[in-house]
Amino acid sequence: MSEHMTNVGVMFPDDAETFISENPESTFTVLDVRQPIEYESEHLPGAKLMPLPELVDSLQDLDPGTTIIVYCAVGGRSRMAAQLLAL
């Protein structure tokens, strides 16, 4: 799994917004690790839903050559997801 993510950092919402606006869509993936009901209620444009419990089984759906921006509601699930991706 180490090929999936090598650098893990913290991005605040403003930082993520700037990154997304300044980079071509093909160079990053926005990954929403919340539950489907949370995603359906509201999500970032272009975000891919991959709930945290399903992440390990869905790694093949991620492009290891792109930056992956992971988010959730508060930060706990996204931190866990980023750590999983960094393994």
Image: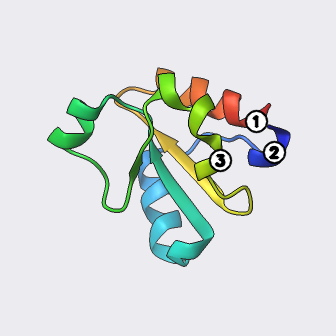
Of labels 1 and 3, the one closer to you: 3
Q: Is residue 74 above or below residue 8?
A: above
Tell me the quarter of the picture where residue 1 sits: top right
Q: What residue would you read off at disc 1?
A: 86
For the residue labelled by badge 1, is the local secondary structure a helix, a strand or a loop? helix
Measured as percent of width and height from the top left, residue 81 is found at 59, 30
Q: What residue would you read off at disc 3?
A: 60
For the residue labelled by badge 3, is the local secondary structure a helix, a strand or a loop? helix
Amino acid type of the residue tagged 2 in the rendering: Thr
Which comes before the other along the chain, label 2 or label 3?
2
Measured as percent of width and height from the top left, residue 46 is found at 36, 62
Measured as percent of width and height from the top left, residue 31 is found at 48, 47
- Residue at coordinates 65% horizontally, 47% vertically from top-left? 60
Amino acid type of the residue tagged 3 in the rendering: Gln
Which comes before the other along the chain, label 1 or label 3?
3
Cβ atoms under marks 2 and 1 closer than 8 Å: yes
Name the mark on residue 6: 2
Mark 2 vs mark 3, CA separation in Å? 16 Å
